[in-house]
Structure formats: C-alpha cells, structure tokens
Image (spheres, rainbow, N blue to C red):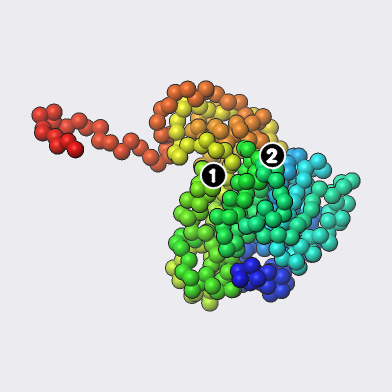
C-alpha cells in the first residue's frame, strides 16, 4: 500500500517543488562553487520536479559506475553524469511513471549539453527494495547514491541489503535522508501526507545505525546534518515533540572493519590531488584531513581510504602490527578502575 501512496503523491499530487507542504524534501545547504555551473546545465523541467533533502556530492567520481536509488526526475543523475565524465555511467531507478517520463524525456538534451557522443545515463522502473528483480549482478557499482528516498521505503533493511550486494568491495553507499530522534508511532506512519513529505517514514537514527551494521555496513559515517524546521503549523502540531533531521551518511562495503575505532598506530597524508579538494578532504563530520599533514587515524578510517577509490590520493603510514587500544577521542575508555585499593582488604571471588 505504501508504494501506491508514494506513486500517487509524487506522480499526481505534487506537480512541482512548490507543492511540498514542509521543508523536509528541500535542499538548503550552500551549493559548492564547483557544482553551480553543473546545476545550471540541468533542464528546467527536471529541476522543477526535484524533491531531495541534501547534496549528493561524493568526491573522486571520474569514470565511476553509479546507481541512484529513487532517481525521480533525474536531477542528481544528470549532475553526476558531468562528474563521472563520458566514460562513467549512471543508472537511475524509480517506481513513479511520471517522474521517469520527465527523466527519460531529457536524456538527449543533457547528452548534447554536456558534449558527449553517447548518453552515460539510463533510467529503469523498479522498487529500491527489490533491485534483484532488475537483474543487476552482485558487486557491479562503485557507488550507490540516494537523496531523500530511503525514508519512503516500507522495507528499509531490504534497501540497505540490496545496496550492500550491488556494491563492489570497497564501494560506498553515499546518501542523504530524513531521520527522527525517536520511533514514529503507527498513527503518524499511516498518514499519507506526512509519509509523502518524508517525515513519518523517517528512520529513527539509532535503528538506522543498527540496521546498517546488521547488513554489513559496519561503521556508518555521518558526513553532515541539519535540523528540519517543517514550517507548517498544522503538521508541526501532528508530529508533536518528534524532532527530524536531514543527514548525509557514507557507508563503505568493507567486511573487516572493527566494532570500535581501534588504534594501530597508523596515519595518512592527503596529497591534495582530488579535484575540487586541493586543500583538504572531509571524509566525515569528524575527519577533515588537511593536505600534506600527517593525520593519525584508526584502523577503520585507514581501510576506508586505503581499500577504496581514495587510495591513490594518500600516503599510508604504519603496518598495523601493534594495537594500542581504542583510538583516542572516540568516546570509549577502559571501563576498569585503575586504583588497586588496599591490598589487605578481603575480596569476594565468584
């Protein structure tokens, strides 16, 4: 039933971004300068039917093979098309006929606009929980992106599981979506407007972390986030004290990551060679890596950089042969009391 509600809302109820009743499905982040000319190339009809909540802007995309989950009118796909170059490839999957029609109608327009001999973007109708129905082979994408769509899925675990299956080893799921600070009650989850506005289907953030880890994404990294203000008094009254956030996460397909950030005496030096990121690279909210500077990292971060498309842009230090405990500053300390106390005191043993 949820699929039908969403197809109705995004295919018929919404005729453009001005029809949205909240700011949940709107991108308010400042646009990086290097993206502004790329965005200016997007056809007006495609841009007018954009309902994202973040900027899907991962780094180092030249030649990448990318899947967009819930591609809608195709705006993000056509932006990514310019970043991967003519030898890269973008596949968009969406379930709404009206949105797919807009996207397909403007493939040739964007191919010509970008000066490509052949289109590097294609769109397929399907459900993001059932990507196996589309015959996509395992380990076939370098990156999977999504923009404010996974919250609309009635089976979010299946979406993450399918994404893990389709990513190449070292590949990445990079996506923006809406999260809540508590679980949504059924009475709100069944409200078609709240669901269509990306609110009542929001992942409770702690459930998201648990689900991501359970399917194999062992160390979810928060890239950026912002609170959603909704700005609709009637809907604010309905949701009460539930707080909502737009957040971007990156999840790497690396099956041997640690449960904690473990210190193995390793470090990296960023070479400053990723396009548009000469001075620094932000891996996530807590890792801004300046170019040319020795940057100590936990083993998980080391693997994320060494076993992914970022490898050629870093110098790696430390063989990881010695373990020094939990990495400093990661919020976990040895739980035992260091004070041995009075040696003459009797001790009960179990």
Residue 126, image x and y in percent? Answer: 71, 59
| Residue occupying the point 53% across, 30% down | 295
Secondary structure at numbered mark 1: loop
Give the residue at x 71% y 70%: 11
Circle 1 residues within 10 Å: few <14, some 14–19, many ≥20:
some
- Residue 42: x and y, percent? 79, 56
Q: Secondary structure at mark 2?
A: loop
Q: Is residue 262 rendered to the left or right of residue 64?
A: left
Q: Quadrant of residue 105?
A: bottom right
Determine which residue is flagged by label 1. 216
- Give the x, y percent position of residue 328: 42, 34
Q: Residues within 10 Å of mark 2 (few under 14, many from 20)?
A: some
Could you say which is closer to the camera, residue 150 or residue 138? 138
Q: Is residue 237 visible?
A: yes
Q: Judge depth for marks 1 and 2 and give the one in front.
A: 1
The numbered mark, 1 or 2, whose residue comes first in the sequence reads 2
Q: In this rendered view, identify the residue nearer to me: 338 or 67.
A: 67
Query: Which residue is outermost to the bottom?
Result: 234
Residue 79: percent from the left, percent from the top? 75, 51
Q: Which residue is mark 2?
A: 60
The quarter of the rendered structure image containing the C terminus is top left
Asked whether residue 151 is in view, the answer is no
Residue at image x 14%, y 37%?
348
- The span from disc 1 to disc 2 (Cα, nearest Å) is 23 Å
Which residue is at 25% across, 32% downward? 338
Q: Which image quadrant: the N terminus?
A: bottom right
Q: Does 211 appear above or below 324?
A: below
């Amino acid at each position: 039933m949820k699929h039908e509600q969403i197809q109705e809302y995004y295919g018929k109820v919404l005729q453009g971004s001005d029809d949205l009743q909240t700011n949940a499905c709107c991108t308010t982040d400042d646009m990086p300068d290097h993206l502004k000319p790329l965005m200016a190339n997007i056809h007006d009809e495609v841009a007018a039917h954009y309902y994202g909540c973040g900027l899907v802007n991962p780094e180092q995309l030249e030649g990448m093979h990318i899947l967009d989950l819930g591609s809608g009118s195709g705006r993000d796909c056509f932006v990514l098309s310019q970043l991967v170059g003519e030898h890269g490839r973008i596949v968009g999957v969406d379930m709404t006929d009206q949105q797919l029609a807009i996207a397909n109608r403007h493939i040739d327009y964007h191919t010509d606009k970008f000066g490509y001999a052949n289109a590097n973007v294609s769109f397929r109708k399907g459900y993001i929980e059932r990507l196996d129905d589309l015959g996509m082979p395992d380990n076939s994408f370098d990156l999977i992106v999504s923009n404010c769509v996974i919250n609309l899925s009635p089976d979010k675990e299946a979406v993450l599981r399918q994404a893990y299956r389709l990513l190449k080893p070292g590949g990445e799921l990079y996506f923006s979506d809406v999260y809540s600070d508590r679980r949504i009650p059924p009475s709100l989850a069944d409200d078609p407007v709240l669901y269509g506005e990306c609110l009542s289907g929001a992942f409770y953030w702690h459930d998201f972390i648990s689900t991501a880890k359970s399917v194999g994404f062992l160390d979810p990294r928060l890239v950026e986030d912002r609170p959603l203000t909704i700005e609709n008094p009637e809907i604010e009254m309905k949701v009460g004290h539930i707080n909502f956030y737009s957040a971007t996460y990156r999840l790497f397909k690396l099956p041997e990551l640690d449960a904690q950030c473990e210190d193995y005496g390793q470090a990296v030096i960023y070479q400053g060679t990723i396009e548009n990121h000469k001075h620094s690279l932000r891996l996530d909210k807590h890792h801004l890596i300046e170019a040319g500077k020795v940057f100590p990292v936990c083993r998980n971060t080391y693997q994320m950089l060494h076993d992914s498309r970022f490898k050629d842009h870093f110098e790696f230090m430390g063989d990881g042969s010695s373990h020094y405990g939990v990495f400093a500053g990661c919020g976990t300390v040895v739980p035992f009391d260091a004070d041995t106390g009075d040696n003459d005191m009797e001790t009960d043993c179990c």
